[in-house]
Structures are given as structure tokens and as C-alpha cells.
Amino acid sequence: MQEELNVLVQAQYPLIYLVTSEEERAEQAIATIAKISRPQRRVFVWTVTHGLVDYEQPRNITQHNTVSPEAAIEWVMNRQRDPSIFIFKDLHPFIDSPATTRWLRDAIASFKGSQKTIILMSPVQQVPIELEKEVVVLDFALPDMGELNQVLTQHLEQNRGRRLTTEAREKLLRAALGLTQDEAEKVYRKAQVTASRLTEAEVDIVLSEKKQLIRRNGILEYIEEDETIDAVGGLEELKRWLKQRSNAFTERAREYGLPQPKGMLILGVPGCGKSLIAKTTSRLWSLPLLRLDMGRVYDGSMVGRSEANLRNALKTAESISPAILFIDELDKAFAGSTGSSDSDGGTSSRIFGSFLTWMQEKTSPVFVMATANRVERLPGEFLRKGRFDEIFFVDLPTTEERQEIFKIHLTKRRRDIERFDLEQLAKVSDGFSGAEIEQALIAAMYEAFAQEREFTQLDIIAAIKSTLPLSRTMTEQVTALRDWARQRARPAAASVAEYQRLEF
């Protein structure tokens, strides 16, 4: 971006609109450009509090005669003859004023051949229609790995921190991607204060700073998961696939020639751990997990608002990448995209189209992790190769997997699980999902708690016997999903995957 800005200044573009919230960093970049320009340019900064002040002068000086926008632009036109760059910081609230707009247009006309440039600096883009043909809009990019490395190095030197390994440094830098330079400095200080050190172990503290970015967005939700991937019973094939890619976003992977993973779709029966595996992946990969709530995207208050919401959400996700974008129950989010024009004016179709385009064209390391229950409701475009790296099918747990699930849930609640016959419980709970097993266990605990005694094996069996699992109430749907997945998706369970490999 700095190179592009330099080119525009050298090419004598009269008006540049720089969208950024990092005033200090942007000023330093512009001052550097002014020094290397031929001829060299002076830099002036305008604020509504101090008027136009020379960049080299102290900032507490006030030029009262240039405090108003119109007076400042007039001064730029008529009083300053040298090649200069004028940074206007607080002009966006005044830019819609007819007088300000007119003065800007007059200034643009007078700048021809004068080596003078006005740069409007603002955190929001607000360009009047009168200036659209005259202005060039640039986004001032957030700090890259190199700039963040300087911040981290400076912090370590100031605090005499111990030397970091290359991998630990990279993890701390990647965790800070998407933050401004000031935010990165603050979060490194926060990690230092919290843990009295700054090592790989403090990556979680750095990641937590990104919550604020997400909270301000309103459509994305930052999810923190305490459970590790070992809390998921079974699904060994899926877990192996995820563990293989735990370092897929590192520089080492780029040097090896590996492309960044795009995403994965997890199909399966409700309650079989699809959402849990998505949440635990963020801990496995040490990446922030962002949940895209499609319900918040849709906004019927104004035409185009829903599409703008989606664009903002995806832009936020990209700004803090590498990250995992989690879309739960994708089949419900985009089920109405085919033929929705009658019901919602085509909003669902447009959102669906925008999302597909983004998935296809994105270059930022945002891993899309989606789950779905009803595959027949998904538009065919989602399922073609290239959208997702892999489509996994999560079936009802096998006997061995149910045994493992019982062990996980019992260990969470009691230390002495030797008194339970896990093999018997696994056999009795045939056709149960992971969620149904957990609920049966909780029901057994409530029963025993009401009678003021410890729950037993018989309590769990009784709770299982009184539960009608989803596999029996929705037999046709489960069978249809299995038939579809057998040919089109990869099984998440290791036993099924091995069987299929032997079959072929």
C-alpha cells in the first residue's frame, strides 16, 4: 500500500482518501514518502483542534486562523507555494458541507502542476458524489508480519525477555495479525503483566485481544473452547486429518510448497459431535474461532443491508486471519437460496452468491469450517470440489466409540469410573448419538440426586431405556444421509474408513 501511495504522490494526484484508524503509523509512512520524493515535499497536518501545523513542529501549537476546514483549504491553495502534502485528519464530519466540497474542488483545480497533494485521513469512507471522480480511495493495510516483528523485538528488548524460538515467535506474531500496531504493543504488554513473561504459552492472551474486534462487528461471535480435541469420542479419521494440518498456516508449510487449506464440510446426524470438533480445532491449531451467525446477517430494514453485513463480517474475518470461520448448520443458513426471490426479494440468493464468490476467490488464510444435517437442502454449488478441501460424514458412533464417549463424560463428573461397566453401557445404547448419551447420563444423575444417593450403572441403563433416540424417530432421514455420504463423503470414523479402503 505504501508503494501505491508513493506512486500517487509522485504522479501528482491532487486528492487521496486514506481509510485508516492508525493515524500515527499512517503519518510516519506519509512523512517517509515526502522525504524520498523528488522534489522533497513538506508535510502539514490539519486537525479541528489545532488547524494546519507543520509535521516537524510540536503538536501543541495552534494555528487559529486555519481551524475551520474552509480556511485551512484556502490557506493550502493560496498561502503555501512549496511542494507539500497536506494531511486532513478530521474532515469527514464536514465533507458533506457544500462550502467544504466546493473549496476542495477549487483546490484540486489549482493544484495542477504544483506538486501539492491533499490526503484525507479517516477511519470511515465518506466521499460526496461531487468528489467521486476526483478522489483516489486507499485502504491503509494493517501491520504485516515484518512490522509486528519489530514491535515484538522492541518489547522483548525493553523487558529483557528471553530469546524466543523461531516457531514461538511466529506463533506470537500470527496471533497478533489483524491488530493495529498500537493494539499489538498493548497486548504484548498485557501478556507480560499477566504472566511476567512473553513466550509461546501466552498466545492465548494475544488471541483474546481479538475478541474486541469481533464484538465491535456484531455479526461474528468469538468462541473460546476449553475442551481439547481428545474430548471428542471416536472420529479418529477426522481427528487425524486435522492433526496433519495443525501447522498448515506456518511459514514452514509455505516454504515446503503447501497451499493454505480452504475449509471442510462436516455432514452428519444431529448430536454426533460436529460442532464440538469444529470448536476444539481452534485449540488444536492455535487459531481464533469466529462463528458466523447468518441470522444476524439478514437485515430487511434497508435494501442491500444484508449483503453489506456479510461483506463486513468476511472483511473482519480476513483482517484477523489466520482464523477459522465456523458456520453451524449451513443447510439452514442457505436452504432458501434456490428460489427465494418470491419470499425475500432475492436477498438469500445474492448472499449465497457473494459467499460462494468469496470462498472461491479468497487469498487470506481463513479456514471455513461448516456443519450440516440435511444434505438435500444444500445447493449443489457448495458441494463441488474446490469449495472445501474435504467433506466428512459423521455417522452414529460405533460400539467402541460409544464406550469412549461414556468414558469421557463419566471422567468429567467422577474420578472412580472403574465401578461402571462401559462395555455393557455401550451395547445398551445402540443407535444413540454422543449428545443423547450425555443427556441419558445427566438424567441418571438427576434421578439419583433427587433420592440423595450416588448414581449407579442401573440408573444410566434405566435412563437409556426410557430415551427414544433420533436414529429411530428419523430413520428415513438418517438412512438417506448415509446412502448419500457413502459415495460422496469421507467417513470420520477410522473403522469405516479402513473398511472402505479395503473394499476398494
Image (cartoon, rainbow, N blue to C red):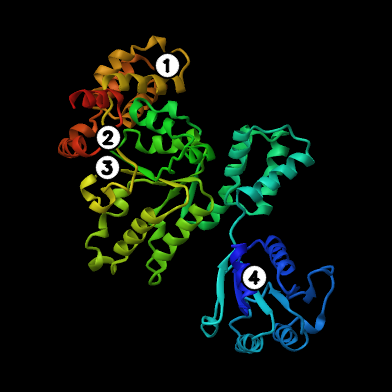
Q: Is residue 37 visible?
A: yes
Question: Circle 1 sits in a helix, a strand or a loop, which is it?
Answer: loop
In the image as oriented, which residue stretches furthest toward the top?
A: 419
The count of marks equals 4
Mark 4 vs mark 3, foreground winner is: 4
Q: Which mark is residue 373?
A: 3
* Residue 100 percent location from the top left of the image: 64, 85
Q: CA distance from mark 4 to mark 3?
A: 47 Å
Q: Amino acid at mark 2?
A: Arg
Q: Residue most toward the left?
A: 476
According to the picture, the residue beneath numbered tag 1 turns out to be 453
The numbered mark at residue 20 is none
Crowding around mark 1 (Cα neighbors within 10 Å: few <14, some 14 to 19, many 20+) is few
C-beta proximity under 8 Å, tags 3 and 1:
no
Q: Up-down: is 19 above or below 105?
A: above
Q: Amino acid at mark 1?
A: Arg
Q: Earlier in the sequence, mark 4 or mark 2?
A: 4
Which comes before the other along the chain, label 4 or label 3?
A: 4
Q: Mark 1 and mark 4: span between their CA atoms?
A: 68 Å
Give the Cα distance between marks 4 and 2.
51 Å
